[in-house]
Amino acid sequence: MAGFKGQAENTIDSKGRMPVPAKLRDFMPKAARGAFVVTQGMESCIVLYPVTVWDEDIEPMVEALDMFDKEQALLARRMMMWCDEVTMDGQYRVSFPANLMELVGLKPGDKAKVLGIGNRIEVWAPASFAAYLNGSSLSAADLAQKHLSKKRSRLMVGRTSMSRS
């Protein structure tokens, strides 16, 4: 599956529903049939995992956590306590649980920043997302050097050849 990518801004309606942007829907695995598992993200956002990604990748990792280890048990509880399965309606909207929206600083009528991040979609309050980005002194280049270093040389070769043209 090609991953979710890109960004959009949508409004959450009075019933706590938000349309999934068309450019992100295009990357939804067909086997998921429009169903997502929504939960708290690792930062102050809502995460939507296609139900197939949740079932095959995420839930097995959570289930493998050691419930006798306090930190692992806390992580499992924080992820699972907010989980809900939602399905896009005929207008491609998903409903967010009110308590999850409150947790991340969103409410009906708010605009939301919607990000496609590989195997998931993240939904942020725009101010929270700006604070998150501005809260780091690391540039994209710094992060790439640290976390993509094995692939970095391949990227730089392509960049060098483009600059010569």
Image (cartoon, grey):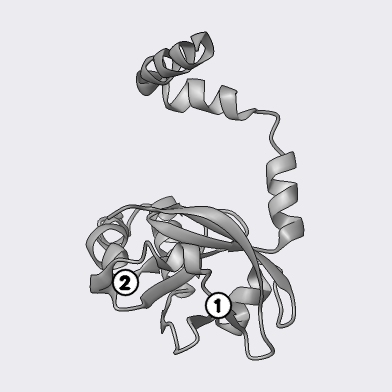
Q: Position of residue 89 (x, y in %)?
A: 45, 88
Secondary structure under the numbered disc 1 in the rendered image: strand
For residue 118, above or below residue 90: above
The three-letter amino acid code for the residue at tag 2 is Val
- Can the viewer see residue 80? yes
**50 or 164, which is in the foreground?**
164
Residue 65 left/right relative to 89: left
In the figure, residue 17 lies in which quadrant? bottom right
Q: Are marks 2 and 1 in contact (CB under 8 Å)?
A: no
Q: Residues within 10 Å of mark 2 (few under 14, many from 20)?
A: many
In the figure, residue 43 lies in which quadrant? bottom right
The residue positioned farthest toward the top in the image shown: 164
**Sequence-wise, which precedes: disc 2 or disc 1?**
1
Quadrant where the N terminus sits is bottom left
Residue for badge 1? 19
In the figure, residue 104 lies in which quadrant? bottom right
Q: Residue at x 50, y 12 (%)?
A: 165
Disc number at residue 51?
A: 2
Q: Residues within 10 Å of mark 1 (few under 14, many from 20)?
A: some
Q: Residue at x 65, y 28 (%)?
A: 138
